[in-house]
Each structure stands twice: as C-alpha cells, then as structure tokens.
Amino acid sequence: MVAQRSYVAKPGELEKNWFVVDAADEVLGRLASDIAMILMGKHRPEYTPHVDCGDFVVVVNAEKVGMTGRKMDVRHYTWYTGHPGLRLESYSDRQARKPEDLIFHAVRRMMPKNKLARHMMSKLKIYAGPEHPHAAQMPMPLQRTSKKVTA
C-alpha cells in the first residue's frame, strides 16, 4: 500500500501575484469576501492555513462602492473615544470622509483574528480614485462574477 503525501507550503516558497479590482458599483460585502479569499490564498491549490499563501490586491474606485437597499444610511460604525458615550457615523458619512475605510474594515473583519491576518492585510492596497502607483507590478484584473449595485 502506497502512502499518499500531502503538500505543505513553506514561507517564501510561493510566488506572489498582483490583482487589481475596480470597486465601482460593487456590493461591499461580496467584494470584501472575494478580496479576503485572495489575501488568504484560498484560491490556490497550495493553500496552507499557517502560511501566508495569498496575493496582493489593489482596489481602485473605493469611493464608488455601494450596498444594497438603504444600508448606507441605516447602518452605523460605532467606536469608543474614552469619554462617556459612543461615537457613531453612518456608512455614507464614513464613505464621504474616508472612502478607503469601508473596504478596509469589511475585509479585515472577514480575515482570521491572528498575527498572520495582520500580515496579510498589509498586502491590501486601497485607493479612492481610479489611479494607483502599482503599475510596475503589472497587476492582473481579478475575474469576479458578483452582482452590481443597481440603485
């Protein structure tokens, strides 16, 4: 009987690719889950949970991402400042003030909660407009089959 051997990736062994994603008229949650999958490396057959197998992702047009329904106005970010009471801000206000934060926090919350995930998040580059400074890395467009925001 021949024993089957499984492959375990080692750090620095896999080649990192670069992908570019256009976030214009995309649904935030669907976009974030696809980006998290690429950052973790789950799209590769060599995926190993304890090794950073993921690729770099460049997101452009972050200011044009949307949500279905009225979620942009109804849902809120809350945070504690150290003083009595919570601060809260709607998603649409946050998008007007810091458009990159919507995608960053949505992806961060879909990643594992450990040191490796913090390292994986450093491979995410988000830009509000259509321009980015990573043309030298020749990023490939990421093929996605997701629904677009229709409102």
Image (spheres, helix red, strand yellow):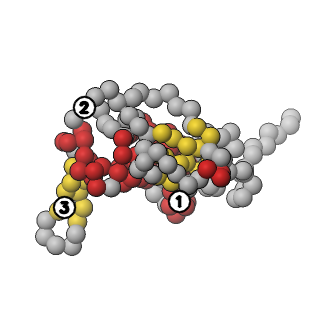
C-alpha gap between disc 3 and disc 1: 27 Å
Please provide percent x and percent y for residue 121.
Answer: 51, 56
Left or right, residue 77 beside residue 145: left
Please provide percent x and percent y for residue 110.
Answer: 43, 48
Secondary structure of the residue carrying tag 2 is: loop
Secondary structure of the residue carrying tag 1 is: loop
* Residue 49 in view, yes or no: no
Secondary structure of the residue carrying tag 3 is: strand
In the rendered image, which quarter contains the C terminus? top left
Please provide percent x and percent y for residue 64.
Answer: 36, 41
The residue pinned by badge 2 equals 69
Q: Are marks 1 and 2 in contact (CB under 8 Å)?
A: no
Within 10 Å of disc 3 (Cα), the crowding (few <14, some 14-19, many 20+) is few
C-alpha gap between disc 1 and disc 2: 31 Å
The residue pinned by badge 1 equals 122
In this view, the residue in front, 114 or 55, is: 55
Left or right, residue 148 beside residue 137: left
Left or right, residue 51 beside residue 64: right
Amino acid, disc 3 = Arg
In this view, the residue in front, 7 or 133, is: 133
Classify residue 10 by image quadrant.
bottom right
Amino acid, disc 1 = Ser
Please provide percent x and percent y for residue 40.
Answer: 56, 48
The residue pinned by badge 3 equals 87
First in sequence: mark 1 vs mark 2? 2
Left or right, residue 15 beside residue 24: right
Give the residue at x 22% y 44%: 75
Classify residue 46 by image quadrant.
top right
In the rendered image, which quarter contains the N terminus? top right
